[in-house]
Image (cartoon, helix red, strand yellow):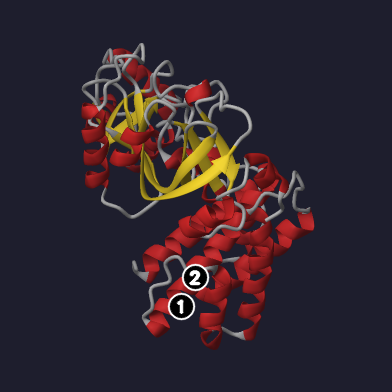
C-alpha cells in the first residue's frame, strides 16, 4: 500500500467530491463515503496486521479492524456501510433522503477526523457550489488569465494539430509581463483541460470558453477539438458509480478476436458509441452475453499518429503496459469496414469468465450498461447472472 500521507490526501479529495455530489447525485455521495471508510479501515488493517486489504468487503474490514478502533468509530463505519450499500446498488429509482445524506457525511467526517486530526468540521457539510474557485488575478490591465489564454492561442496561431507544453505557456505569460503567478497559470491550464480531473473542482465558464485544451501526455497539450475528442469529463462520468456498472458491448462480428486479445475496439464518438466508465465488461453475441471480465482501462487514439491516451484506469496496472497492449491491438485490427478508422477507443480487460446472460430480443445498440448490484467481484457477478435473462436481472432487488 501507499503511505498514509498520500492516502490521507485522497481521502480529503473524495470527501470533497462526496459533498459536491450531495445535491445533484445523492447515491454517489453515499458511494464515495463508503469508499473513504474502506480506504481508512484498509490502512488501519495494513498498519496493525500487515494484511493487504485489497478486495476485502467493508463488512469484513470492520470486523478485522474493530480491535484497533474506538467503539464510536465502529458505529460510524456501520452507518456508512448501511447507507453505502444503498448508494452502490440499483434501488428501482428510489433516491436517498436528505437525512441519509447528512448522516452519512457526518459519520464519514467523524471517522476522517479520527484518522486525520487536521480535518475541520466545516469541511464536512454538503456544498452547493464548487468549494474551490480559481483565483483569476487582476492586473493593472484588468486582463484575466482566462482571457490571456485565449489571446495566446490566437497570437501563436495554434491549430488542432499543434502541441504546446506547460513550459511554453508559462514563457508566453512571462513575455507579456502580466504579473500573474506561475502557480495560477498552471492551475488555469489544468482547469481549461477537458480531460483533466482538476476541472471538476472549479467553477467553469458557462459559455464553454474554459474547454480549451486536451492533455496528450504529462506537460503536453493541444487544442480541444469537439468534433473528434470525447466530451469534457463530468463528475458523474468520471467518478460517480462506475464501480456498479457492467458495460455490455456488441461483439456479434468480433467475439473470438476480442476474447483472444482481451481488448475491445470501437469508434470513439458520441451517441451510440459512447462507452460509460464501468467496472466490468460483457461480450455479447447471439442474444446472450457469453463472457464477462474486469475492465482495466480505456485508451483513446485521436488519429494514426496518436500515441494513445489513458482516459481512465480502474487498476494500478502499468500505464506503459496498458498503452502497449492497446497499440498492439489497434495495429492488428482490420477496421476497413468502419467508414472512418479514427478516432478509436480501446477497452482493456482481464479475468474473462464464461456466462450465459440472455435476452429475448437482439441487441440493437453498440453497448448497454447494467447494474452489478451486490456483486463484489467477477466471480460473484458471473455466478449471479449465469443462466438468467436481462429482464430477470433488472427485476430482482439484489
Secondary structure beneath dot 2 equals helix
Task: Please state if 17 lies on the left or on the right of 299 as rendered.
Answer: right
Q: Are marks 2 and 1 in contact (CB under 8 Å)?
A: yes
Residue positioned 38% across, 73% down in the render: 52
Q: Is residue 392 visible?
A: yes
Q: Which residue is at the front of the view, 322 or 145?
A: 322
Residue positioned 23% across, 33% down in the render: 327
Query: Residue 157: horizontal and vertical position, in percent?
Result: 28, 12
Q: Is residue 144 visible?
A: no
Q: Which residue is at the front of the view, 43 or 266?
A: 266
Placement of the C terminus among the 4 image quadrants: bottom right
Query: Residue 30: horizontal and vertical position, in percent?
Result: 64, 56
Query: Residue 229: horizontal and vertical position, in percent?
Result: 40, 23
Residue positioned 42% across, 67% down in the render: 54
Q: Place residue 260 in its image quadrant.
A: top left
Q: Place residue 87 in its image quadrant.
A: bottom right
Please name the residue that numbered disc 2 is placed on. 40
Q: Place residue 216 in its image quadrant.
A: top left
Q: Which mark is residue 44?
A: 1
Task: Please state if 182 lies on the left or on the right of 122 as rendered.
Answer: left
Q: Which residue is at the front of the view, 206 or 107?
A: 107
Secondary structure beneath dot 1 equals helix
Is 71 above or below relative to 213?
A: below
Task: Please state if 101 lies on the left or on the right of 172 as rendered.
Answer: right
Amino acid at each position: 500500500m501507499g503511505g498514509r500521507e498520500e492516502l490521507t490526501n485522497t481521502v480529503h479529495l473524495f470527501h470533497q467530491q462526496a459533498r459536491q455530489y450531495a445535491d445533484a447525485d445523492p447515491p454517489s455521495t453515499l458511494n464515495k463515503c463508503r469508499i473513504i471508510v474502506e480506504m481508512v479501515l484498509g490502512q488501519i488493517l495494513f498498519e496493525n496486521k500487515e494484511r493487504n486489504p485489497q478486495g476485502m468487503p467493508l463488512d469484513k474490514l470492520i470486523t478485522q479492524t474493530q480491535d484497533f478502533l474506538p467503539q464510536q468509530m465502529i458505529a460510524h463505519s456501520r452507518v456508512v456501510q448501511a447507507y453505502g450499500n444503498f448508494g452502490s446498488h440499483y434501488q428501482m429509482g428510489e433516491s436517498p433522503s436528505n437525512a441519509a445524506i447528512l448522516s452519512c457525511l457526518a459519520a464519514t467526517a467523524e471517522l476522517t477526523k479520527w484518522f486525520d486530526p487536521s480535518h475541520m468540521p466545516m469541511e464536512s457539510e454538503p456544498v452547493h457550489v464548487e468549494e474551490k474557485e480559481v483565483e483569476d488575478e487582476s492586473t493593472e490591465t484588468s486582463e484575466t488569465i482566462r482571457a490571456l489564454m485565449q489571446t495566446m492561442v490566437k497570437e501563436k496561431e495554434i491549430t488542432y494539430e499543434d502541441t504546446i507544453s506547460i513550459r511554453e505557456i508559462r514563457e508566453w505569460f512571462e513575455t507579456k509581463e502580466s504579473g500573474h503567478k506561475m502557480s495560477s497559470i498552471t492551475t488555469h491550464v489544468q482547469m481549461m483541460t477537458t480531460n483533466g480531473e482538476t476541472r471538476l473542482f472549479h467553477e467553469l465558464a458557462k459559455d464553454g470558453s474554459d474547454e480549451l485544451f486536451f492533455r496528450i501526455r504529462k506537460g503536453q497539450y493541444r487544442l480541444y477539438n469537439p468534433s473528434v475528442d470525447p466530451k469534457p469529463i463530468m463528475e458523474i462520468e468520471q467518478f460517480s458509480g462506475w464501480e456498479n456498472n457492467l458495460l455490455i458491448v456488441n461483439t456479434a462480428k468480433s467475439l473470438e478476436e476480442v476474447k483472444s486479445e482481451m481488448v475491445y475496439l470501437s469508434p470513439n464518438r458520441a451517441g451510440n458509441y459512447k462507452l460509460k466508465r464501468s467496472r466490468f465488461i460483457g461480450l455479447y453475441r447471439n442474444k446472450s452475453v457469453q463472457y464477462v471480465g474486469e475492465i482495466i482501462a480505456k485508451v483513446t487514439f485521436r488519429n494514426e499518429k496518436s500515441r494513445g491516451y489513458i482516459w481512465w484506469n480502474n487498476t494500478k496496472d502499468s500505464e506503459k503496459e496498458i498503452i502497449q497492449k492497446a497499440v498492439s491491438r489497434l495495429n492488428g485490427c482490420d477496421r476497413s469496414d468502419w467508414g472512418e478508422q479514427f478516432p478509436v477507443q480501446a477497452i482493456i480487460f482481464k479475468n474473462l469468465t464464461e456466462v450465459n446472460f440472455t435476452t429475448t430480443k437482439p441487441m440493437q445498440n453498440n453497448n448497454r450498461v447494467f447494474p452489478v448490484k451486490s456483486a463484489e467481484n467477477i466471480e460473484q457477478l458471473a455466478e449471479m447472472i449465469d443462466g438468467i435473462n436481462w429482464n430477470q436481472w433488472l427485476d430482482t432487488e439484489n
